[in-house]
Image: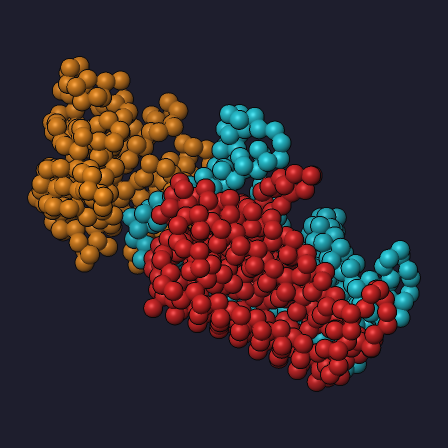
Chain colours: A cyan, B red, C orange
């Protein structure tokens, strides 16, 4: 499993990648917030947001097929979750499907939620396509995410590869020893392997801590890069947020 | 699973849950730094990676079904509530930003549900149960398993509440579908957590920061506080509905024999007045904060 | 001239009481290249961790470059002693190599520009320049060991300490490591089972058996003495 396939456009120069990661995160959150909270029936503002997102995708040189592939799974999850709304909301009936009844308010809510979810996913997919994990961490730190969380994530990035490697190795060893058939056997095996991995993960954490101490670590991870905020990037972000805010206001007032 | 995508929750709920979880995380960050000091980073990093890896695993349950571990209770028992909340938050953050598992706008709600309530309630439950069952390894495993189930069910209640307060579905429907769903999922979580805790406890008991502490008879206080918090939350949820007769409607609904009998519910007309959702949201936030503070108080008093 | 390392009657016991090291006394001077030999479990790693304050002796004293190792001096000691651990993955924990190598200088107070420049220089010197913005799991085992070495060399320590550095290296990487060690000006202490690695590189050998220093003398002499090698459990 690799995180690297996720940020293949992080090295393509574009106005999006030139924006410091903190700015990219703020922009993403702003767009997602506006999209996620649009009132029901606000189709024009939704359209504007979609157009805005597509423009950003184009600016970042992310091809539409890549974007759609990355949207597919989360969209599927939302579809399943919101489909239940069709039959869970009381009100005048539209369609009867066996024991379940699709109601008008249910259909309304379904449409609203699906639309909002789809449009909120766009900036998220853009962020993950254009931002490498280290950049994301720098952005989060700049945005004052608790130091422990940022440090934990930074280390977890490396630890995850090592943990997954270890899990795989232990699983293979256990399987070759036991050749366990049947769900219960497999589960016991997996639990034993998982527990062993937990022990090794914690041991690795301790050894890493020693290595950090040996190189002078005193509690806070030092930062190497300072993402330079150019006036252009600041203006671009401000513009983006203004448009998003305008859409939000217009959707409620207009 | 329990991750709420974007698009479901209303602004008051998003804002309220975000505020409540930010507060809880700030408290957690301070406590975690105080207890763990400089090894906080590597320790949390290792556990965060482990939770990520563990969540990817498929545990076969038989009959063609399999379960995924959420890990909130395991983390709570391993690291305690403060560090545990931070680890779960780290996982949720990356899941939202990188994997679109859970919405970005909804991160506050998901954090409150899984990181704060999930880990917090697991901690409270484990301590209460161990106070009642004793502190031998066997009791700890049982306590962890039951706590995992309780905690997961509570997450379900929280999700249902947030969906209701966002004016999406009536509370009973949400509770039935989402709550019940989590109750079922909670069984798998309980089994897996119990098994993992049992194995690790036998092999490496020193890994558990809090499982091997003796409780000093604070169990009843903790249980009482938890019960009070839950009661307040339930009352607030019911009161939060904009129609004064929703309680009657709910009761009538339970008494009805068939589905689809028309009941005057608040959702027949979903154009809500401006004040409505904000009042509902505010009460919901207050309830969530109360639960959080109840848990925090229980934890703090336990530590002293 | 101040000795780089001075151990005086150092003993270390684990919290449960088991003794890991007893009556260790020795001195390492500037520029000396010393091999620390001994069977597994003899206490080599323990001794190494005493040198940078990760462990504190139960009795006796450890002095680095004239500084007695204690809470007040430990930060400075860790700048003088560069410890390369056994598993490179324990030392490459940041998202990019450059950050890993710059970690030490940044902690010591260097500016970002200075730390980055020094990190680039060391990575270039070790042939790892192309990987500076990648994570360690993109490197081969040998490259990772070099990268771990880089994280320590960048701080220009007075004493370079290596714990089993040739673990899983192929012959070519092993030769590379030998060359690097030959070029070092600072004092070098290599804990290893790999006699071929240190032959010709280190002039002096310390042998630890069961926590006790049983030999402190020329490496060549030791390597030529079959009986002694067998007695110490070092025979290849």
Residue occupying the point 39% across, 50% down: B136
- Please give left or right for residue A207 compared with residue B27 in the image: left
Q: Nearer the viewer, residue A179 or C24?
A: A179
* Above or below for C171 versus B113: above
* Above or below for A16 versus B227: above
The spot of residue A210 in percent (x, y) is 32, 47
The spot of residue A110 in percent (x, y) is 80, 64
The spot of residue B185 in percent (x, y) is 63, 52
The spot of residue B18 in percent (x, y) is 57, 70
Residue occupying the point 51% across, 47% down: B194
Q: Is residue B139 visible?
A: yes
Q: Residue furthest right?
A: A95
Residue occupying the point 16% across, 51% down: C69
Q: Residue furthest top?
A: C226
Q: Nearer the viewer, residue B255 or B122?
A: B255
Residue occupying the point 62% across, 77% down: B236
Task: Check the picture and name the quadrant holding the C terminus of chain A.
Answer: bottom right
Q: Is residue C114 visible?
A: no
- Please give left or right for residue C79 compared with residue C123 in the image: left
């Amino acid at each position: 499993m690799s995180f690297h396939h996720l940020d293949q456009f992080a090295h393509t120069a574009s106005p999006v990648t030139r924006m410091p990661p903190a700015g990219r995160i703020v922009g993403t959150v702003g767009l997602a917030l506006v999209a996620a909270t649009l009132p029901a029936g606000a189709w024009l503002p939704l359209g504007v947001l979609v157009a805005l997102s597509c423009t950003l995708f184009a600016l970042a040189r992310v091809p539409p097929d890549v974007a759609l592939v990355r949207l597919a799974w989360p969209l599927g999850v939302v579809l399943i979750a919101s489909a239940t709304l069709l039959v869970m909301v009381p009100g005048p009936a539209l369609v009867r499907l066996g024991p379940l009844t699709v109601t008008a308010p249910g259909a309304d809510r379904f449409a609203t939620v699906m639309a909002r979810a789809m449009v909120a996913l766009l900036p998220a997919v853009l962020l993950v396509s254009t931002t490498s994990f280290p950049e994301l961490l720098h952005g989060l730190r700049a945005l004052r995410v608790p130091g422990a969380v940022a440090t934990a994530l930074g280390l977890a990035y490396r630890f995850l590869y090592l943990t997954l490697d270890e899990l795989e190795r232990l699983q293979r060893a256990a399987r070759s020893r036991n050749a366990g058939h049947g769900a219960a056997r497999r589960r016991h095996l997996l639990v034993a392997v998982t527990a062993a991995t937990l022990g090794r993960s914690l041991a690795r954490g301790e050894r890493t801590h020693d290595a950090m101490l040996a190189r002078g670590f005193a509690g806070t991870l030092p930062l190497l890069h300072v993402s330079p905020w150019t006036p252009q990037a600041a203006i671009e972000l401000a513009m983006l947020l203004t448009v998003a805010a305008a859409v939000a206001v217009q959707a409620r007032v207009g | 699973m329990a991750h709420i995508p974007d698009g479901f929750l209303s602004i008051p709920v998003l804002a309220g849950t975000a505020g409540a979880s930010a507060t809880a995380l700030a408290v957690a960050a301070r406590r975690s730094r105080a207890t763990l000091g400089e090894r906080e980073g590597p320790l949390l990093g290792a556990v965060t990676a482990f939770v990520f890896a563990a969540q990817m695993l498929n545990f076969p349950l038989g009959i063609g079904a399999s379960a995924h571990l959420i890990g909130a209770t395991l983390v709570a028992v391993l690291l305690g509530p403060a560090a545990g909340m931070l680890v779960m938050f780290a996982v949720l953050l990356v899941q939202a930003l990188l994997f679109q598992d859970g919405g970005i706008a909804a991160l506050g709600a998901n954090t409150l549900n899984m990181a704060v309530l999930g880990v917090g309630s697991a901690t409270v439950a484990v301590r209460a149960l161990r106070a009642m069952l004793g502190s031998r390894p066997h009791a700890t495993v049982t306590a962890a398993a039951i706590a995992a189930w309780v905690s997961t069910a509570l997450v379900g209640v929280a999700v249902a509440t947030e969906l209701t307060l966002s004016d999406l579905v009536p509370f009973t429907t949400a509770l039935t579908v989402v709550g019940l769903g989590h109750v079922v999922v909670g069984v798998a979580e309980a089994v897996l957590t119990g098994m993992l805790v049992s194995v690790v406890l036998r092999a490496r008991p020193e890994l558990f920061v809090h499982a091997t502490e003796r409780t000093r008879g604070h169990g009843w206080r903790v249980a009482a506080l938890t019960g009070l918090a839950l009661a307040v939350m339930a009352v607030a949820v019911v009161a939060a509905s904009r129609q004064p007769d929703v309680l009657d409607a709910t009761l009538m609904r339970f008494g009805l024999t068939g589905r689809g009998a028309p009941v005057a519910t608040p959702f027949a007309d979903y154009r809500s007045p401006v004040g409505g959702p904000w009042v509902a949201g505010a009460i919901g936030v207050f309830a969530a904060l109360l639960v959080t503070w109840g848990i925090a108080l229980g934890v703090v008093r336990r530590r002293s | 001239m101040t000795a780089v390392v001075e151990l005086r009657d150092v003993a270390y016991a684990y919290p449960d009481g088991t003794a890991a090291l007893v009556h260790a006394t020795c001195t390492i001077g500037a520029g000396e290249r010393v091999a620390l030999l001994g069977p597994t479990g003899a206490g080599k790693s323990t001794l190494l961790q005493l040198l940078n304050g990760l462990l504190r002796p139960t009795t006796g004293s450890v002095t680095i470059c004239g500084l007695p190792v204690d809470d007040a001096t430990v930060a400075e000691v860790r700048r003088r002693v560069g410890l390369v651990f056994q598993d490179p993955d324990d030392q490459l924990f940041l998202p990019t190599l450059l950050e890993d190598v710059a970690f030490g200088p940044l902690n010591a107070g260097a500016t970002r520009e200075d730390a980055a420049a020094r990190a680039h220089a060391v990575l270039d010197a070790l042939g790892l320049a192309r990987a500076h913005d990648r994570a360690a799991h993109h490197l081969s085992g040998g490259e990772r060991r070099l990268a771990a070495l880089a994280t320590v060399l960048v701080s220009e320590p007075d004493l370079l300490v290596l714990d089993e550095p040739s673990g899983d290296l192929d012959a070519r990487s092993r030769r590379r490591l030998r060359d690097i060690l030959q070029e070092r000006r600072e004092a070098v202490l290599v804990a290893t089972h790999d006699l071929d690695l240190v032959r010709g590189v280190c002039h002096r050998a310390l042998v630890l058996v069961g926590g006790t220093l049983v030999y402190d003398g020329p490496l060549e002499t030791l390597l030529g003495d079959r009986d002694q090698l067998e007695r110490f459990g070092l025979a290849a």
